[in-house]
Amino acid sequence: MQRVSDILKGKAKQTWTVPPDSTVYDALKLMADKEIGALMVVDKKGKVAGIMTERDYARKIVLKGKTSPKTLVKDIMTPMNKMFAVKPDTTVEDCMVLMTGKHIRHVPVFDGSKFLGIVSIGDAVKSTISEKDVLINQLSNYIAGQY
């Protein structure tokens, strides 16, 4: 069974971050440039303060009549104490259950207090499909007598 750590091994090592005092506009520009849907918010000491997602922008800027050049990331991010997270040894299935049940698309991975990366729902689905494909090939080979 695949674990979240397996997904992280297959992803780029770079995780994009933004300081809490950045403007939402600058964060959105970074997300667009890197083609990602979430950024970890990290303070000057390197401590994770929260996560900013496209959903945070849609619900806390657009719908509230604010503007992204004048609003700071810290004002719309999901703070650490309200953020859902997983551990590296969490199964991909359990990660998907969390993401589906809580209606979130990105989940940070922590080993204790150390931030390791972000897993998206797309990463989890891709991993699950890959695991199922391997199983189907093994069963097909077994049925065909190729073992």
Image (spheres, rainbow, N blue to C red):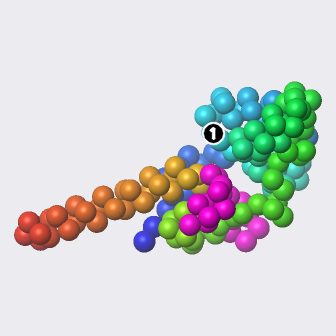
Image point (50%, 68%), residue name: 93
Image point (61%, 60%), residue name: 99
Image point (54%, 63%), residue name: 96
Give the quadrant of the C terminus: bottom left
Give the quadrant of the N terminus: bottom left
147 or 100: nearer the viewer: 100
In the figure, is residue 30 to the left or right of 64? left
Image point (65%, 29%), residue name: 33
Residue labelled with disc 1: 36
Q: Secondary structure at mark 1?
A: loop
In the image, is residue 125 part of the stretch drawn in magenta?
no
* Magenta-colored span: 97-118
* Whole-percent x, y for residue 9 in the image: 51, 57
Asked if residue 75 is positioned above or below residue 113 in the image, the reply reads above
- Dot 1 surroundings within 10 Å: few (below 14), some, or many (20 or more)? some
In the image, is residue 108 part of the stretch drawn in magenta?
yes
In the figure, is residue 65 to the left or right of 52? right
* Whole-percent x, y for residue 39 in the image: 72, 45
* Whole-percent x, y for residue 124 in the image: 51, 57
> Is residue 46 visible to us here?
no
> Is residue 40 visible to us here?
yes
Give amino acid for label 1: Ile
Asked if residue 134 is positioned above or below residue 10 in the image, the reply reads below
